[in-house]
Amino acid sequence: MKAKDMREKSLEDLREMEKSLANDAFQSKLKNFTNRLDDTSQIKKLRRDVARVKTLLGELGRKPVTAKVPVAAKSKPAAQAKAPAKKRVTKAVKAAKSEAKK
């Protein structure tokens, strides 16, 4: 089933569909193990359908963030700008400095 068609379904329908697809996938795996499954591509199709339903359930479970933040508050002030990264002193550089001091 296409995700477009699934988006039109209600939350309860999606939950029920998830359970039935998961059960069908399990039954197909069991039939494949016992060599009674004719179309082995059905396992892959069912697994992807379950993933589609779970994705849609996750999207419906999330609530959109609609907090309005002023534009000036979004940018970092100049005082909080990152300091430049320190240069790493390697063993070779340390050895060269100690040789120069001698």
Image (spheres, rainbow, N blue to C red):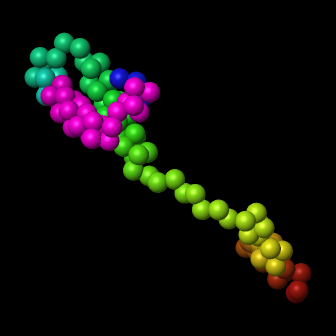
Note whether 84 is above or below 32 in the view shown.
below
Tell me which residue sits at (10%, 23%) in the image: 34
Q: Is 33 displayed left or right of 70 in the figure?
A: left
User: Magenta segment: does it hold 31?
Assistant: no
Whole-percent x and y of residue 7? 41, 33
Residue 84 appears in the picture as rendered = yes
Q: Which residue is at the far bottom?
A: 102
Tell me which residue sits at (32%, 23%) in the image: 45
Tell me which residue sits at (27%, 36%) in the image: 13
Magenta stretch: dominant SS? helix
Whole-percent x and y of residue 58? 39, 46
The residue segment tinted magenta is 4-28
Location of residue 11 (image quadrant): top left
Whole-percent x and y of residue 69? 68, 65
Q: Nearer the viewer, residue 83 or 55?
A: 55
Q: Is 34 displayed left or right of 62 in the figure?
A: left
